[in-house]
Structures are given as C-alpha cells and as structure tokens.
Amino acid sequence: MIKIRKAKEADFEDIWDIFHQVVKRGDTFAFDPKARKEDCRILWMSPPVHTYVAELQDKLKPIDMVLAGLWGAIP
C-alpha cells in the first residue's frame, strides 16, 4: 500500500538520491544539474515549505512511479 506522509529530516538522503538521479541528466529546466545538496535541503526541508514523500513497502518512491502504480501501470 502506498503511504503519503510529511517528510522527516531523516528522509532527505532518499529525497536527494531520487532528485539527483533525475536532475543530473541535465534535461530538466527547473533545476540546475549542479544544484548543491545543502541548497536543496534548505529549499525542501525548511519552513514554511511542507515536503511530502510517498512510501511503498517502507521505501521512498519517485512520485511518477507512485502515480503509475495508482493507475495500474506497475505492479
């Protein structure tokens, strides 16, 4: 079952890993592929921002995989 919850500071390493895998390719326009980890931590983990994560089988998942799962595209 997919669980959506507010991110905790302990989640940031997983959030960063997911984000960095996407952005490092350089084909996104919203984020610089050279974005620094600490800058992203401040952006997503500091008030007034509320970051949420999706968990599937106790692991964080990229939101596109979560949505595909909800639509039945992945098991």
Image (tube, rainbow, N blue to C red):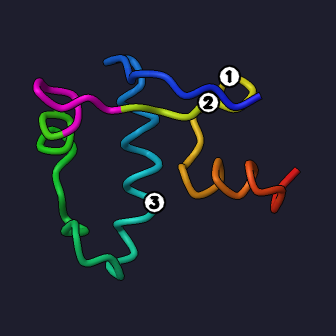
Q: Residue at x 19, y 44 (%)?
A: 40
Q: Residue at x 40, y 31 (%)?
A: 52
Q: Residues within 10 Å of mark 1 (few under 14, many from 20)?
A: few
Q: Evaluate if marks 2 and 1 touch, with contact meaning CB atoms under 8 Å apart.
A: yes
Q: Which residue is mark 2?
A: 55
Amino acid type assigned to the residue bearing label 2 in the image: Glu
Classify 69 as above or below 29: above
Specify which label sits upstream in the sequence, 2 or 3: 3
Secondary structure predominantly adopted by residues drawn in magenta: loop
Rendered-image quadrant of the N terminus: top right
| Position of residue 66 measured from the top left corner of the image (x, y, whole percent) | 64, 47
Specify which label sits upstream in the sequence, 1 or 3: 3
Indicate which label's residue lies in the foreground, 1 or 3. 1
Q: Which of the 4 quarters of the picture holds residue 61?
A: top right
Q: Which residue is mark 1?
A: 58
In screen coordinates, is 33 left or right of 75? left
| Helix, strand or loop for disc 1 | loop
Q: Is residue 49 magenta?
A: yes
- How much space separates mark 2 and mark 1, taking CA atoms? 6 Å
Pick whichever, 12 or 2, lies toward us: 2
Indicate which label's residue lies in the foreground, 2 or 3. 2
Amino acid type assigned to the residue bearing label 1 in the image: Asp
| Position of residue 30 measured from the top left corner of the image (x, y, whole percent) | 22, 70
In screen coordinates, is 46 left or right of 72? left
In screen coordinates, is 64 left or right of 27? right
Amino acid type assigned to the residue bearing label 3 in the image: Gln
Report the disc number at residue 22: none
The residue range painted magenta reads: 44-51
